[in-house]
């Protein structure tokens, strides 16, 4: 962790003061799993969000964007098992009703409630179960972990973290929870990520630091190249810690802590990609521009051939170079250097001999690193992904069944 | 087949008059498989080619582009098992030597020989085996099928065809051979495709019809989204049939026959994608522009989630719509219609009920069709792909081992 903040043991999205969460089994995902949850704050919050750039957007995404226009929100109601996407006007009516049910339960105005749904596309929400479920949810101070479990779909572990920050403006905490696993190639946000803080934060600053944190974390994660219509990242700041207002001029530490929280969650998503056995980090240096470095890193991290090779611990680096060449980033083969787990495998356009068995042993680790030096400029970026295993196919060939 | 031409039974790339081919086992791919071949014409040819747009290009691609500048060629020497890509200056020297060895053997000038290599990237060609192998090749009139087998890597069947054409300019034939299987998401050409004709063809016309035929066939095929540094499609026209010169003003039938040959080969590649169990056709209609229709069709056909669902006969059409939404093509959800095997599953942004068991039975066929009507304009395009099975991963996690 960076200077000035540290991880809270077993921290969750309800670790910051004044946040509550609860979840129930509503038989949306399967009969005996948590799948409907509420995250709320005791006090009104300044809020910010970034959403999918997919032109097909789920009803909850459209509604939450509308509810966030005034940069205020106090609760999020979320379900897994059904995305409420491609469901037409009735899908929008269902999303509005979800927000209203949660608002009525919590004594809030409907426009201060955000909605998120994740799961199968093109299927209507089972509203009877949603109505009954929302009635049964009991938000509590220690409910963060339950919420983390309730938003999981094919995730194999809950993704959550909280950090305690000591700043000149006072002490505060930031909590976060995310879900991932499949249809992960975010573009403005990941599938679902909820962040909380008890700091008092200026609304414009909050939006700008969230956008930046997401750009360097969730937007650099790829599992399968498929961007979801449900991508949502939202942060709520309730001021319960009584800090001075954090804004552009004094917000450096807040920004760093938020970056760290998002990075942790994003890497957890990559590590837990559907069927993944390892986390892959792809760093690109010396690109002509940062945008080209991002493009190259993401393209390599999402190449099915490269990912399959990594699953087999196969140092077939030609696939890295082939993916770079089609990425759209400018590249000069004669200047290119490629490193696999720190070992140079290609330099100035020619192969470099390496110990194959030793390399294979290294690639069998839980984390693999790739670095490319393009020697064309100063653009750099890091992307995270995972390997491609038979299990990814098994999971995704029978998702709706 | 279209009017004016018909398929030649067991037709190959040597079915047109005056073309010879031969292949040998040179232990490049494995000890007992054909992997080195020569295709040549008894007479000089007018030639045209289209090559990969990957910025990393193999030495054979760079050399063949140079040799094609005068729009003339008389032979192609090709190996599988090693791509001779990312091999630096020595790789280029090896490609030049391959061309020279073939030229000397055939009594041609080196600049009239094209070179193609397919296989692992970043590994030098085993030149002793290449030298010995080229010496042993005996090109014959019926060698086309041997060449088709020699260029296979993970292909499970040879892809070849020939058609006989009756035109006002005289009778002629067009033959073609291709390889595919992996790293297939061509952009200007597929991995390897060689076409021959005994018609007399104007060089500029030949280049333009080849470019167009490739755009609507090979460039609309996708197996895994990875564009290869070796993509090459070349056509040789030797005039042996003694036709009048075929050119823009009289070339409509030639163009149609060439389109048909390329389409047949491209669909064969999709059908034989690594681990594929079925061919998937994605047709997009009513896009704002043709370029957007092409983008949408290719994006859907290459979505790992959609491909995995098709493998499982799972009518999870939400993945089609999600891929469309991220494709970059303009889309209005409220106008969108989606058909799976001819059955409407979404209309005007809402799901349409269908018989799930019947749909699953239909999806179990060897060919599956998807159609999207965007209702925004007149752009249309068709792309071909295949499903994603566990076997794709198995094949690609151990390719270099």
Image (spheres, coloured by chain):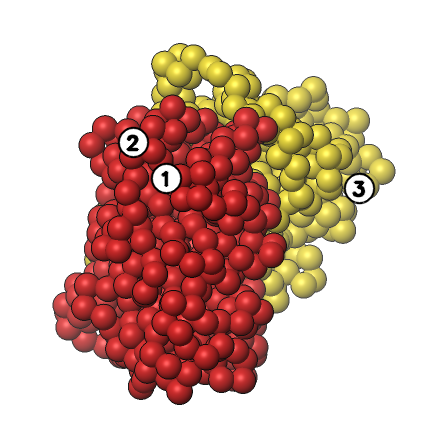
Chain colours: A yellow, B red
On the question of residue B295 being in view, the answer is no
Return the disc, 1 or 2, that comes first in the chain's sequence.
2
Label 1, label 2: how many angstroms apart (C-alpha)?
9 Å
Label 2, label 3: how many angstroms apart (C-alpha)?
69 Å
Q: Which mark is residue A247?
A: 3
Report whether mark 1 lies on the same chain as mark 2: yes
Q: Nearer the viewer, residue B213 or A65?
A: B213
Report whether mark 1 lies on the same chain as mark 3: no
Q: Are marks 1 and 2 in contact (CB under 8 Å)?
A: yes
Q: Using the image, name the chain to which the residue with label 3 belongs.
A: A
- Position of A334 relative to B226 (above/below): above
Label 1, label 3: how many angstroms apart (C-alpha)?
63 Å
Q: Are marks 2 and 3 in contact (CB under 8 Å)?
A: no
- Circle count: 3
Residue positioned 66% across, 22% down in the render: A2
Q: Position of residue B153 (x, y in %)?
A: 30, 42
| Residue that label 2 marks | B26
- Tell me which corner region of the image, top left, top right, bottom left or bottom right, holds residue A379: top right
Residue positioned 48% across, 67% down in the render: B210
Task: Indicate left or right for B58 with B342 as reference.
Answer: right
In the displayed orientation, state which residue is furthest to the right. A249
Q: Nearer the viewer, residue B43 or B345?
A: B43
On the question of residue B255 being in view, the answer is yes
Q: Position of residue A320 (x, y in %)?
A: 50, 35
Comparing labels 2 and 3, the label whose residue is closer to the camera: 2
Q: Secondary structure at mark 3?
A: loop
| Residue that label 1 marks | B79
Task: Indicate left or right for B83 with A136 as reference.
Answer: right
- Position of B147 relative to B100 (above/below): below
């Amino acid at each position: 962790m960076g200077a000035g903040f540290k991880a809270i043991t077993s921290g969750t999205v309800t670790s910051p003061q004044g946040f509550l969460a609860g979840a129930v089994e509503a038989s949306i995902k399967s009969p005996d799993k948590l799948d409907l949850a509420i995250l709320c704050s005791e006090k009104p919050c300044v809020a910010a969000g970034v959403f999918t750039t997919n032109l097909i957007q789920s009803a909850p995404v459209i509604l939450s964007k509308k509810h966030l226009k005034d940069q205020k929100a106090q609760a999020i109601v979320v379900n897994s098992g059904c995305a409420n996407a491609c469901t037409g006007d009735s899908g929008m009516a269902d999303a509005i009703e979800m927000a209203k049910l949660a608002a009525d339960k919590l004594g809030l105005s409907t426009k201060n409630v955000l909605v998120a749904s994740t799961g199968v596309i093109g299927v209507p929400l089972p509203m009877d179960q949603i109505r009954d479920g929302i009635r049964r949810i009991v938000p509590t101070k220690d409910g963060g972990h339950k919420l983390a479990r309730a938003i999981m779909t094919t995730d194999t572990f809950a993704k959550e973290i909280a950090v305690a920050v000591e700043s000149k403006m006072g002490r505060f905490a930031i909590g976060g929870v995310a879900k991932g696993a499949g249809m992960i190639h975010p573009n403005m946000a990941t599938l679902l990520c909820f962040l909380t803080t008890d700091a008092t934060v200026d609304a414009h600053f909050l939006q700008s630091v969230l956008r930046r944190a997401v750009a360097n974390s969730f937007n650099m994660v790829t599992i399968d190249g498929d961007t979801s219509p449900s991508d949502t990242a939202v942060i709520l700041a309730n001021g319960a810690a009584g800090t001075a207002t954090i804004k552009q001029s004094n917000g450096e530490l807040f920004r760093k802590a938020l970056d760290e929280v998002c990075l942790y969650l994003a890497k957890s998503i990559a590590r837990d990609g559907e069927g993944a056995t390892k986390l892959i980090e792809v760093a690109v240096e010396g690109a002509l521009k940062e945008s080209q470095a991002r493009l190259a890193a993401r393209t390599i991290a999402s190449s099915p051939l490269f990912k399959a090779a990594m699953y087999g611990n196969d140092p077939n680096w030609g696939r890295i170079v082939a993916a770079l060449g089609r990425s759209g980033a400018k590249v000069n083969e004669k200047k290119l250097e490629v490193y696999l787990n720190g070992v140079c495998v290609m330099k100035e356009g020619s192969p470099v001999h390496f110990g194959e068995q030793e390399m294979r042993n290294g690639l069998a680790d839980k984390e693999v690193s790739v670095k490319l030096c393009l020697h064309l400029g100063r653009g750099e970026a890091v992307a995270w992904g995972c390997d491609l295993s038979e299990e990814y196919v098994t999971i995704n060939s029978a998702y709706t069944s």
